[in-house]
Image: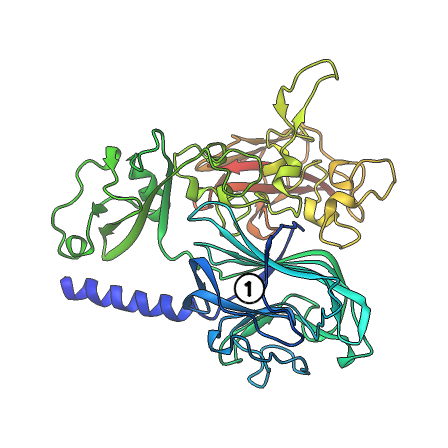
Amino acid sequence: MIKKYLFLIVLFSIYLKGNSQNNYAVTSIPFQQYTATSVLQGTMDDRYSDIITIPFSFDFYGVSYNQLLVSTNGYIDFRTNLANTNSPFSFTQTIPNVAFPVKNAILGAYADLNNSNGEGTITYGVYGTAPHRKFVVYFYNNSFFSCTASKSSFQMILHETSNIIDVQLIDKQTCSSWNVGRTVSGLINTAGDMGIAAPGRNTSTWTAYHEGWRYYRPNYYTNYSFVRCDDNNDGFQTFNLSVALGDLFSNPSGITFYETQVNAINQTNPIVNNSTYVNQTNPQTIYASGNGVIKQIILSVVDCDTDFDTDTVSSATEDVNIDTNLANDDSDFDGIPNYLDNDDDGDLVLTNVEYVFARASSSQSINAILDTDNDGIVNYLDNDDDGDGVLTFLEDYDRDGNPSNDDTNANGLPDYLESLVALGVSPVSFNSNQIRVFPNPATTILNIQNNTTETYASVDIYSISGAKVKSLKATESLTTISVADLQSGIYFVKVTMNNQVGNYKFIKN
């Protein structure tokens, strides 16, 4: 038995090591601009900076760094041996490419920049509190070589712990008369054979304004995290480990917790007080073992007076499923827990924009968080804020990455908050009395009650990201659907019957 467990652990670690290095993906995020006040020393044309030490370790393509360089041509380079040397300014290749002149780099908006006129700045700074700090490099108003009238402003943001990379393209103009205006925004590894660019932002001539991109690694979080608020600020808290059981195992029977990996392998000295376990260190790794599987669980206690994602929602409030674990609440399934995510529903509207309060009248005080469509899901957790059946991020009709500035009928109300505006989509045909979706929230089953005279309908369930997760034909007045296998979060139910369509939402606990 011991040999079997050792084999599984070694195989699992080999898989994670290889898998974590080469699977970056990129997705659009809301535009958000940071400030940075530390001035980069040495901003000569085509030049690498001195070595800059960042206050946390950052994993890039599977290697951990706490030092980096900034090139005056618009990128971060982890090859610190190149400090104070010339950085390449000319390139023709798209990434990835082993012949690309820059390697092991985060390309914010790499082009031949030359700020010798002193009109722009290059600065850097640190945001937030450990272990969720951000390191920001800010290029503001930098000129292009031979095109001093054209400017480039953008930011590169490195996230502690999650190792996520954000690029905010503030105002990237172009200079087509030099190097054909070539610019690239993306990542490239140390060999050049792995890399990724944002859509439409690989090596070519392009402009961008108020555009955000996030680079992340799917399934990067290899261990289960259990994060609790610290009630008395002493770094220790009582954990109900059954919460982790429910998240990690479809059948939790026969699973036992251990404080060390050796004990888990040997199945000795189990934790006996599962419902009232107090962490011994902060953080602390424990192990769940059973049925031939060993899984790591990282227990952490954090100060919930800190708004880690600066979205104005208190960290304690971001425990949406109210199970005491902040780390398993991920409303938009983007791999970032709500308490670390400044766009909780993934609709390209920042949470702090949607976290507003409704008033019954101007004379009344604040009474409730805004829920525009009155569906029981507040806007900052709702990816269809107006209940028109069109996901909020799809109401970005000018495709600039920001649904908040789309007002196609010019009435002063953004389209994503106005149910009468749903371009290219048929309006909802059923009223609330004809189709009922319950219970809401749902844990194991969801009922679709058909109160119409029709007896044949199709039912499709979609995740908040738009992926279809279940589909069936309903021939009864009451159809029961198992949702026990779905992750916790917000889902959409589409009922189609006799050429009519109804869209509904429910929360899976």
Left or right position of 53 against 299:
right
Q: Quadrant of residue 200?
A: bottom right
Q: Which residue is mark 1?
A: 25
Q: Residues within 10 Å of mark 1 (few under 14, many from 20)?
A: some
Closest to the observer, 321 or 221? 221
* Percent x, y of residue 493: 60, 41
* Percent x, y of residue 249: 33, 48
Closest to the observer, 280 or 401? 280
Secondary structure found at label 1: strand
**Amino acid at pointer 1:** Ala
In the displayed structure, 52 sits above or below 502; it is below
Q: Quadrant of residue 94?
A: bottom right
In the displayed structure, 20 sits above or below 388; it is below
Residue 504 in view of the camera: no
**In the displayed image of the protein, which residue is found farthest to the right?**
410
Task: Name the residue at 59% across, 46% down.
Answer: 464
Residue 384 in view of the camera: yes
Task: Name the residue at 11% across, 50% down.
Answer: 268
* Percent x, y of residue 46: 65, 77
* Percent x, y of residue 281: 26, 44
Q: Quadrant of the N terminus?
A: bottom left
- In this picture the colour scheme is rainbow
Task: Name the residue at 29% across, 54% down.
Answer: 295
Number of callouts? 1
Closest to the observer, 116 or 310? 116
**In the displayed image of the protein, which residue is found farthest to the bottom?**
99
